[in-house]
Image (cartoon, rainbow, N blue to C red):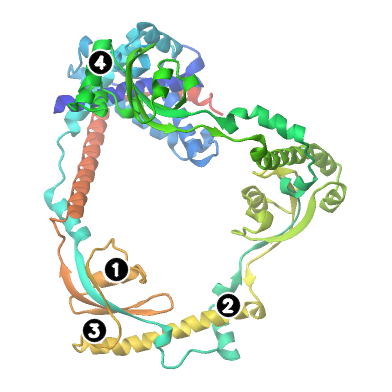
């Protein structure tokens, strides 16, 4: 078992090394760091490679950009402590590697060879390890086989030590049981809902005095947000699309250029399983026919999964090998063995996709809409330079609207406005950042439109005039008054419950809930109902505001977690696994820190500065 885990971990480390190599082909790895500095520091006798630090730091910056869509500078990364996080990670890795060397933990040449040969990145055209591919990949990364194999050996030894330190960690039984019991604990209770239609007298319309008082008491609810008064000019492709003139020749030309899009040949969804000989392919096919094996089992037996052999949807012209045989099938099935460049293969047809033919007449309207929209976008884009020149010459937005196709408009913009041009993210960003000192500039929208804006004034938050807010004030008062009266009614009913009455005897339709856990959801009830119920003792009751109504709940029984329930068992397994992983990580972190202190750390700040200097 331990060996299996070690093998899997070592495979992971090989792939990590390969990923770092590929990343190294771009940016830092493409040119390397100049000079003779090879290390940014040491832990014991193990150097921390300068290029590895540069690559991992660059990976972190790229990960941030992938998540946010915005590039991160080194200064920003340092402000967030990202560079220190990368350095600390490499220091801990080096500390464990140093300890592995100190105690003489290593792996033999055969294990290193097995990992290298099994790495798909070094496979040739036949799917097996290819020495030329191996050396070529390493050469592009600036590595020699000796250096790479030494890193595989060191990483594997380190992974073995890490597994030895963190393996076999189990969650404390009492801790896990307590969490499971708390999470899986259940309640059975009944509840009724009091709504406005149960009031003896309708709430009605408030008096002017009530309206004024409610407005004054809840002025925050009737306060308008900061408003930016903007003037803008806007030109969208849709605004000029009717001006675009197209003739049949234009449409026919586009149709001819996109012939393959409108006329798709018959295709097949295929999977191709390669064998090393005709005999093995025939034996596999016969086993499938006899029913002693399945295609999936044959795939697994070759160390692959279905994703590895999936060819997708393929036309006959795209299938170099076995096209006629494959497309001779009139229903899903298996053909072969078929000779391919990679060896004999069984090809499974999973689905037959009929040919699709769309004539020019049938495609005309679609082509007209698309071509007109494209030309409208180009027309708008062609006007950007002219608009820029006019603005640079001092033209106002009103003058711009007179001399171009742009439309003049005004808007009181607030955060969250999504009407008209305010629905565009680009406009919202510009509106939020504009100052009264800014000069208008041409900006683009994601649909190909353009706009320019200027900030005329910023109106601070202020109460909405009562006359304008009157309808909302009345509605708010009615909700508040309804809730107040229902609460009074609920207090009377709760007093009866406290005197020994049961909820079902109060004369209102009740709902009974059984075996409810803290994570359950009850329709028509606010989530706080469950929280309040779990705070009760059996027989106790609670009143909960239910957004315009009132809920009264009475707890019938407290039930422990059902340990035989499959969901509870899955929960227990997940909690145990999570606790064990957390303890294992903490154990490994503590071990790494101890090894750091024991071995000693030295950091070359000049080398770090040299790496940082290459980042923007």
CA–CA distance between discs 2 and 3? 37 Å
Numbered label attached to residue 334: none
Residue 211 appears in the picture as rendered: yes
CA–CA distance between discs 4 and 3? 73 Å
Q: Which residue is mark 3?
A: 504
Q: Which residue is mark 4?
A: 282
Q: Is residue 457 above or below residue 206?
A: above
* Sequence-first disc among 2 and 3: 2
- Give whichever of 214, 476 is nearer the camera: 476
Q: Which residue is mark 2?
A: 472
Residue 385 found in image quarter: top right
Secondary structure of residue under mark 1: helix
Residue 475 found in image quarter: bottom right
x and y percentages locating residue 425 in the rendered image:
61, 49
* Mark whose residue sits in front, 2 or 3: 3
**Badge 2 local density, few (<14 within 10 Å), some, or many (20+)?**
some
* Mark whose residue sits in front, 4 or 3: 4
Q: Which residue is mark 1?
A: 531
x and y percentages locating residue 407 in the rendered image:
79, 53
Farthest top residue in view: 132
**Is 605 on the left-hand or right-hand side of 388?**
left
Q: Is residue 365 above or below residue 615?
A: below
**Is 606 on the left-hand or right-hand side of 394?**
left
CA–CA distance between discs 2 and 4? 79 Å
């Amino acid at each position: 078992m331990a060996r299996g885990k070690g093998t899997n971990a070592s495979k992971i480390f090989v792939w990590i090394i390969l990923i770092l190599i590929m990343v190294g082909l771009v940016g830092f790895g493409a040119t390397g760091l100049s000079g003779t500095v090879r290390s940014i520091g040491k832990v014991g006798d193990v150097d921390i490679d300068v290029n590895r630090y540069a690559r991992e730091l660059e990976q972190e910056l790229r990960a941030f950009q992938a998540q946010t869509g915005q590039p991160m500078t080194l200064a920003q990364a340092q402000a967030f402590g990202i560079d220190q996080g990368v350095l600390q990670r490499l220091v801990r890795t080096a500390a464990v590697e140093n300890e592995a060397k100190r105690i003489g933990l290593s792996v033999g040449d055969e294990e290193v060879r097995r990992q290298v040969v099994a790495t798909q990145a070094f496979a040739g055209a036949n799917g097996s390890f290819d020495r030329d591919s191996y050396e070529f990949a390493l050469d592009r990364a600036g590595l020699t086989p000796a250096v790479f194999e030494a890193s595989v050996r060191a990483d594997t030894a380190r992974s073995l030590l890490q597994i030895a330190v963190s393996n076999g960690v189990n969650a404390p039984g009492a801790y896990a049981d307590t969490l499971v019991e708390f999470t899986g604990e259940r309640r059975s209770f009944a509840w009724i809902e009091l709504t406005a239609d149960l009031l003896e007298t309708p709430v009605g319309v408030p008096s002017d005095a009530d309206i004024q008082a409610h407005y004054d008491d809840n002025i925050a609810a009737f306060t308008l947000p900061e408003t930016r008064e903007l003037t803008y000019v806007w030109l969208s492709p849709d605004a000029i699309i009717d001006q675009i003139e197209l003739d049949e020749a234009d449409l026919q030309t586009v149709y001819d250029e996109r012939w393959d899009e409108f006329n798709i040949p018959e295709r097949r969804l295929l999977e191709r399983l390669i064998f090393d000989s005709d005999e093995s392919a025939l034996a596999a096919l016969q086993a499938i026919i006899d029913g002693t094996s399945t295609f999936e089992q044959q795939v697994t037996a070759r160390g692959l999964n279905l994703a590895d052999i999936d060819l997708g949807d393929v036309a006959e012209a795209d299938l170099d090998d076995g096209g006629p045989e494959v497309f001779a099938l009139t229903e899903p099935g298996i053909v072969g063995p078929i000779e391919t460049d990679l060896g004999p293969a069984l090809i499974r047809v999973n689905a037959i996709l009929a040919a699709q033919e769309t004539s020019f007449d049938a495609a005309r309207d679609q082509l007209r809409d698309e071509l007109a929209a494209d030309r409208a976008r180009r027309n708008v884009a062609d006007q950007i330079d002219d608009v820029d020149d006019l603005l640079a010459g001092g033209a106002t937005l009103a003058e711009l609207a007179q001399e171009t196709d742009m439309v003049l408009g005004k808007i009181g913009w607030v955060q969250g406005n999504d009407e008209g041009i305010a629905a565009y993210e680009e406009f919202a960003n510009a509106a939020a950042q504009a100052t009264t000192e800014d000069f208008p500039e041409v900006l683009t929208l994601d649909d190909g439109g353009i706009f320019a804006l200027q900030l005329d004034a910023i109106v601070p938050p202020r109460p909405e005039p009562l006359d304008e807010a009157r309808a909302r004030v009345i509605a708010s008062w009615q909700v508040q008054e309804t809730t107040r009266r229902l609460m009074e009614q609920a207090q009377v009913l709760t007093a009866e419950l406290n005197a020994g009455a049961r909820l079902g005897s109060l004369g209102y339709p009740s709902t009974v809930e059984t075996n409810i856990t803290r994570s359950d959801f009850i329709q028509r009830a606010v989530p706080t109902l469950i929280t309040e119920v779990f705070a009760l003792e059996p027989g106790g009751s609670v009143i909960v505001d239910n957004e315009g109504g009132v809920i009264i709940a009475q707890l019938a029984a407290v039930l422990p977690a059902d340990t035989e329930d499959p969901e509870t068992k899955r929960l227990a397994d997940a909690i145990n696994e999570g606790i064990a992983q957390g303890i294992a990580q903490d154990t490994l972190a503590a071990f790494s820190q101890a090894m750091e202190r024991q071995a000693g750390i030295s950091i070359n700040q000049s080398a770090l500065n040299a790496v940082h200097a290459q980042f923007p």
